[in-house]
Image: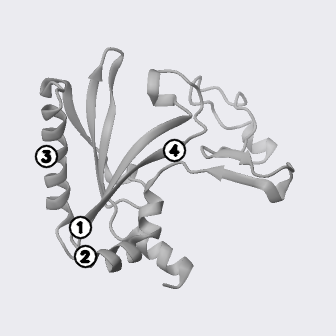
């Protein structure tokens, strides 16, 4: 928006026009410098999630393991996010360990049934490790709130002392990631 247009946009907080700050670049990826020189050629970003390594290696995993869909791949690793503020315990951490499980199914399969199966399995697991089932609930993402890659997503919420928040999510990602890697690599 131009400065003139910005002056007419009402603030979501106050409803008054002309109180918004100018637009700024926003990036949740954690930027760093690699090497001894701090210039544009040394700029790098620490990974904000662990899943992409699974998608990049999908073909290699499938061929060397002689697997056919459906099959799953899990990994644990460090992830880094340039979050806005370090409040609310782990929900705003900059560096953390996360586990990702990607379960690949035939693109023609019923992703709704498979997603429900995994939601039940995850809830059973959480109860088996000692979490009180009464502290768990689900939140289904409406279609207009889904990530660009998702066909569906449901979060399993936990009632913490400070309120209810996401403990884990089960997303039906479809073939988005594999197609994008295939397009970029030509393989």
Helix, strand or loop for disc 2:
loop
Name the residue rendered at 36%, 59% in the picture. Answer: 150
Name the residue rendered at 31%, 48% in the picture. Answer: 142
Identify the mark at residue 24; answer none if there is no mark.
none
Mark 3, residue position: 120
- Label 4 vs 2, first from the N-terminus: 2
- Label 4 vs 3, first from the N-terminus: 4
Mark 1, residue position: 71
C-alpha span from label 1 to label 3: 18 Å
Q: Nearer the viewer, mark 4 or mark 2?
A: 2
Helix, strand or loop for disc 1:
strand
Q: Position of residue 45 (x, y in %)?
A: 66, 51
- For mark 3, does the 10 Å Cα neighbourhood hold few (<14), some (14 to 19), or many (20 or more) residues? few
Mark 4, residue position: 79
Instruction: Say above or below: 147 vs 78.
Output: below
C-alpha span from label 2 to label 3: 24 Å
């Amino acid at each position: 928006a131009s400065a003139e247009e910005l002056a007419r946009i009402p603030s979501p907080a106050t409803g008054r026009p002309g109180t918004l700050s100018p637009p700024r670049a926003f990036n949740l990826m954690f930027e760093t410098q690699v090497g001894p020189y701090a210039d544009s050629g040394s700029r790098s970003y620490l990974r904000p999630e662990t899943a992409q390594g699974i998608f990049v290696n999908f073909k290699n995993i499938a061929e060397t393991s002689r697997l056919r869909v459906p099959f799953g791949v899990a990994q644990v690793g460090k992830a880094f996010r340039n979050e806005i503020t370090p409040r609310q315990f782990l929900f705003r951490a900059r560096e953390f360990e996360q586990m990702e499980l990607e379960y690949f199914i035939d693109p023609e399969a019923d992703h709704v049934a498979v997603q429900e199966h995994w939601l039940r399995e995850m809830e059973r697991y959480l109860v088996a490790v000692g979490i009180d089932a009464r502290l768990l609930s689900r939140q289904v993402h409406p279609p207009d709130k889904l990530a660009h890659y998702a066909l569906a997503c449901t979060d399993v919420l936990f009632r913490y002392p400070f309120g209810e928040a996401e403990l884990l999510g089960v997303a039906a990602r479809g073939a988005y990631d594999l197609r994008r890697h295939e397009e970029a690599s030509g393989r």
